[in-house]
Amino acid sequence: MQIHWWVILIISLCLIVILFFVVKGIRKLLGTRNLYKKGHSQNLKHHNNVSIKSKQEPQLEVYVLDEAIQNTLSVVSNLYKEERVLNKNKEEKSLEGQGKSEMEDDLNSDRSQNQKLIQQNIKFYSGESKNENNLINNQDIDKQNNDAQQFEAEQNLKENQINLKNNSQAIEIEISKLQGQDNKSLNTNRGKLSKQISQKDFQSQDISCSEFSSTKHLTLLKDLQMKKQISQEAESQSPQKSIVIQITPTDNQNQQKYKFIRVNKNKLMYVEDRYNYYTGLAFYYKVQYDKEYNPKFEIYEGQFDKGKKSGKGILYGGKSKFINYDGDWKDDQQHKEIQEQKQEQEGDVKIEIEQIVKPKKKIQIFEEGKLIQIDKKNQNQIPFDQQTQWVKFNQQYCTKDMEILKKETVWFTSSIIDGLVEYLNIQMENQLINFLKKDVKRYLFCPSYLYTNMSQDRIQNNLIIFQNHILEFEPIDFNLTPLFQRVYFAINKSKSHFFLLYIDFPSKSLNIVDSIQKKENAYSTEIKIFQNIFQQQITSTNFISCTQQRNGYDCGPYTCLNMYQDFYKLMQVAYPKNKQQTINNPLEMRQFLFDILKNNDNK
């Protein structure tokens, strides 16, 4: 194939034109020395946005041939883009009156340094590229321009990524703040709910949704309460914390409603089957204690659905036969409409009472012939130590009781002995699990006021007094033998002497423990009263030997001491690891009673 001479001529002219423009561009590069500084500072600005607050100053390294070409040509490509920025900067600098000369000196020094660096790069490039006739073809120029554009695109992409990351972090912070506000609102609402429940009886609750920030929070609180209640119920009904006892059939099986007793700590439930989550007819007893160990009783008999009061049922007022509510239930709550009607009726009754009842008269109280409380209108006020009163272990105390315990020669009051009775019963109930594990039956201690209210001539009345005290065992005809092996009674004989009496079911015996022991006929009244109550469960009478007092004022401490020592021995059998305090004499008993009965608010 033959090439025409005019083709060669055209190609030569094109190469000459290209060479001309290249030389012209290099000269222009040398004429605009300050532009390299601007381009270089712009690149550093992008670099500092991407890096994590780097404090390292940029350094210019010696590149190999390809890197030097890329560096030089990238500067060339940025020159044209920075002309507008330079013009803008010149206009802004013209408005600045101060510091202009200093800035120009800095720029001149920077320009001279940049000129030297560019000349070094050009010499390096020209010395290495002599074999290529010192030409840069169009393909290389296009490639370097593309690289410059790619570099700028990468910088923009990195900036966008940084902005996106910052935005996402800001969004996450905002979300966490909102979640914190929601959690705070939820905790506040939960506190409101728990406070309301603690202040009022559960049956009279009417919680309004307006007290919560949203219905979502209300639903969540209800779910949490439901789960907690189910968890507690399941835990209390586990074989480790409860026991199911089969009730022995009685002679009159038609009146026997229940076949089993489910025994939990502070709970009894008489049922027809063994199901954990009971459904059907049941008799339910529960006692709760406040921080001063004062009991709050609940007795319910009626329908249950999976362990909850649902259907027809009767709620009694505390530990009594007085009916507090008789009607429909759903999920342990009274039916809303009937509850509202009852509240309206109670409101009407209260209004009528306020209209009928006359103002109360002031009562004057005498003790040993001395006035200890009078009308507030009178100027004679009782001393502060006698005014201070508190209720603990279901008994009322005052500072005078504490003075009795501090002195060695003063008689005990009934409230002191009855406080110990309640303390011992609570301690035994707390160790119910260990009694169940060892298959050991407990002792039941009864307060002194039971016998004080009894009389030898009123046999039926004596039985009613005792049965009302153990009303939770009515479904099994007040038979205590499935759960207890002994029943103790503190006796205040003629209001002048204390001693101890207990019924032992395994031996069917009535046992008398007296620190001033007398002949059997001296206890004929007590023997007759309790034989009429327990009947076939007592076949013999025994006198238990004990330490005899040598004075006329320690009968109360010895009665408490004899109770406590029997309690201590049984606790060692059921739970030896539990270190109960040992008490050996009346003085130690007085100090022990002072410690457990004292007022914790005003010590």
Image (cartoon, rainbow, N blue to C red):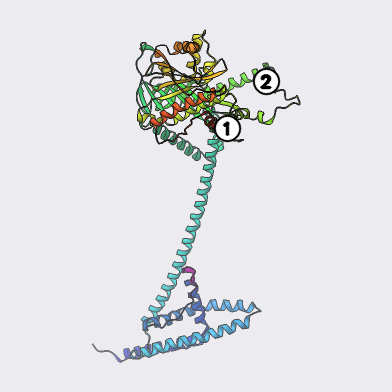
Q: Which residue is mark 2?
A: 365
Image position, residue 588 (x, y; %) = 52, 31
- Tag 2 secondary structure: strand
Task: Kindly tell me whether residue 21 is visible in this rendering.
Answer: no
Q: Residue furthest right?
A: 379
Which is nearer the eye, 46 or 305? 305
Q: Which residue is mark 1?
A: 598
Identify the amino acid type marked 1. Lys
Image position, residue 22 (x, y; %) = 42, 87
**Picture layout, residue 170 above or below residue 30:** above
- Give the Cα distance between marks 2 and 1: 24 Å
Q: Is residue 344 magenta?
A: no
The quarter in which the N terminus is drawn is: bottom left
Which residue is located at x 49 percent, y 84 percent?
114
**Picture layout, residue 94 above or below residue 513:** below
Which residue is located at x 47 percent, y 72 percent?
47
Image position, residue 342 (x, y; %) = 55, 21
N-terminal of the pair, mark 2 or mark 1, is 2
Which residue is located at x 38 percent, y 90 percent?
127
Which is nearer the eye, 179 or 144? 179
Identify the amino acid type marked 2. Ile
Q: Residue furthest left?
A: 1
The quarter in which the C terminus is drawn is: top right
Segment tinted magenta in the rendering: 48-55
- Left or right of 582? Residue 353 is right
